[in-house]
Image (cartoon, coloured by chain):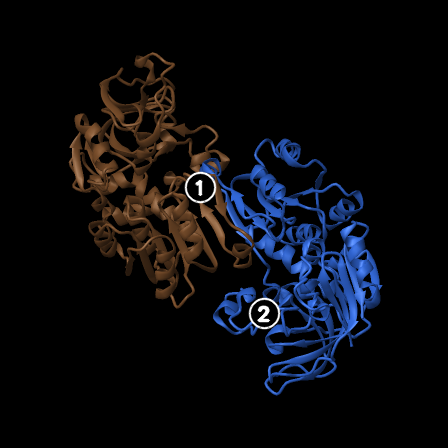
Chain colours: A brown, B blue
Amino acid sequence: MRATLIYGAGDVRVEDVPDPVLREPTDAVVRVLCSCICGSDLWPYKSMPVAESMPVAERGQRIGHEFLGVVEDVGSDVSGLHAGDVVVAPFVWADNTCDFCAEGLQTSCRHGGQWGAPGVDGGQGEAVRVPQAQGTLVKLPVGEDSALLPSLLTLSDVFPTGHHCALRAGVGPRTTVTVIGDGAVGLCAVLAAKRLGAERILLMGRHKDRTDLGRSFGATDVVAERGDEGVEKVRELTAGDGTHAVLECVGTRQAIEMSMGVVRNGGAVSRVGAPQYPEVPMDFAVFMRNVTLTGGVAPARAYIEELLPDVLDGTVEPGRVFDRTIDLGEVPDGYRAMNDREALKVLIRS
Amino acid sequence: MRATLIYGAGDVRVEDVPDPVLREPTDAVVRVLCSCICGSDLWPYKSMPVAESMPVAERGQRIGHEFLGVVEDVGSDVSGLHAGDVVVAPFVWADNTCDFCAEGLQTSCRHGGQWGAPGVDGGQGEAVRVPQAQGTLVKLPVGEDSALLPSLLTLSDVFPTGHHCALRAGVGPRTTVTVIGDGAVGLCAVLAAKRLGAERILLMGRHKDRTDLGRSFGATDVVAERGDEGVEKVRELTAGDGTHAVLECVGTRQAIEMSMGVVRNGGAVSRVGAPQYPEVPMDFAVFMRNVTLTGGVAPARAYIEELLPDVLDGTVEPGRVFDRTIDLGEVPDGYRAMNDREALKVLIRS
């Protein structure tokens, strides 16, 4: 079959790889219907060092952690899943039974792991061997040709990530929210905050097509300014106080600094942008303001059942974040387009 | 009257100052029965620069933010308080009616402030003018000679601070807890965690008399090691996982680093030690573990009514943190004794 490998910064290739087969009785094999490129895939795309000490043939690493497909085969220990089932996979695999999973933290599963790790397939390919399939995969009540597939695919990562961000920040009715970042995660955070009843949602972003989608997802205000100017603008819009919740969906030092600037005393900054910084400015002044920093990598698996009905009945349409659809062979150009900000989020039809 | 002033590092004096009088209709005047020295008073005692550009007579600043006393006079806008009432004051004053106060964040009160600020008395003196008296003071159903006064005095700061720390960290039944620091705040955090039902409480501290008191407050394990060794020890005691909650009651960079090392994935570090560091190490690895950093200066006022019954009926005895009682004139030596770790926490009888 064909799958996507990354060899170093800027070097993504679609190549022939062995077809996946069951290795463990807890495995399943899934034929991929659609997958996508994540903002976090762009970090290695921007900066992954080329492993020059290795032979070229061994340098490539599988990539992609969001996919939806059809079960082709299941191991003897897998129950509840059958060939032909349409399923979505969360962006880490997990047994969904250990103590961490029981607490809703499948990203720390004692028997889980990441797609694309050594010996594990990535999601951007024609098929995937799914470890811990019974715990990992969620069956979807739709056919292979459902028009809902793009929105259902977002259950793999980007929509639950926005939901995790909002939930951890305590968003609910009467909450005021600032969302930092108008990428797909930021827009899904807007959608999640709206779904949780947020009273007011300020979206910080400067790409009008994206912030327009943010408005249709529920943003009540858009702030194009950044840095100190952005903080000042949010303060102006909130009578000087800032907002109860800040959803940090970028991951840069500037974004986390802005977060501390716009959060209301006693409020929470929730971060889901993979941090590109080692330290967070949380000094005595922040301490005196009782600001909480929360969030982290989203345990998407914990939220899929909760979010699924709203996707199925069209209450939310997170699939609108996909503004480009490509074939598997076009994946290298998909990375380029997202990296150049030509595309917001790219959907791959396998 | 006499009151305590700080002139610079190591220079604390008890001097004659004007008697307090009502200035605003929202004021009260309280004759102090007892006050105490806080670990946070030691920060200026260690490092406050001498204001050499000012005349000596103007350099002194009032100090002390924990006191309990008897109402002597109330302004015309104060209801519910009368001369002769025994009252405790939380360590910031607040109107207790603004939106922040209504949320339980009296430390951010829109009309509040700190004891010892310019124009405001400190608590380590014979009497105090209390701004926003109706919102600030809590009447205590005891006489001036009650044996409970030391425990009731802790409601001013140190016990609610421990409670805030534990509450923000989400401590409850089945929670495992690490408390970092065996000072009075750390010991009160142990007591608060126990009161909230924590299943297991690991106290990190190396002063046996203090950790012994910690054990009697509810600590199940004591870890004397610090730094990496301390982290390793906590991990050993928790099957490698760390604890759900970490109560950071020191405020140093080492303490916050240890906190990140001993917290369980998905858990919370709650800090009430005034941070002596500008940044917190919360990098990609911490993000992947979904660790929350919370806490901050404790809104003691929010918790007094809740904690009071348990103090009155002897369920908890936080006053046991006082291991030395002095007269007001001995305050300079009280600072020295706490700074030299001769005393855990010093109670001052006015």
Crowd band around label 2 with a 10 angstrom C-alpha radius: few (<14), some (14–19), many (20+): some
Q: Say if mark 1 contacts mark 2, CB within 8 Å.
A: no
Instruction: Tell me residue A64's x, y (percent).
Output: 30, 30
Q: Nearer the viewer, residue B61 or A303?
A: B61
How many numbered circles does the render carry?
2
The three-letter amino acid code for the residue at tag 1 is Gly
Instruction: Tell me residue A125's x, y (percent).
Output: 24, 25
Query: Which numbered dot is residue A104?
Result: 1
| Mark 1 vs mark 2, CA separation in Å | 41 Å
Which image quadrant: the C terminus of chain B? bottom right
Helix, strand or loop at disc 2? strand
Query: Which numbered dot is residue B113?
Result: 2
What residue is at 39 percent from the left and 63 percent from the top? Answer: A235
Is residue B148 in view? no
Query: For residue B327, what is the image quadrant?
Result: bottom right
Query: Which numbered dot is residue A144?
Result: none
Q: Nearer the viewer, residue B93 or B219?
A: B93
Relative side of B303 to B312, left or right: left
Instruction: Tell me residue A169's x, y (percent).
Output: 43, 52
Instruction: Tell me residue A239's x, y (percent).
Output: 39, 68
Q: Nearer the viewer, residue A257 or A36?
A: A257
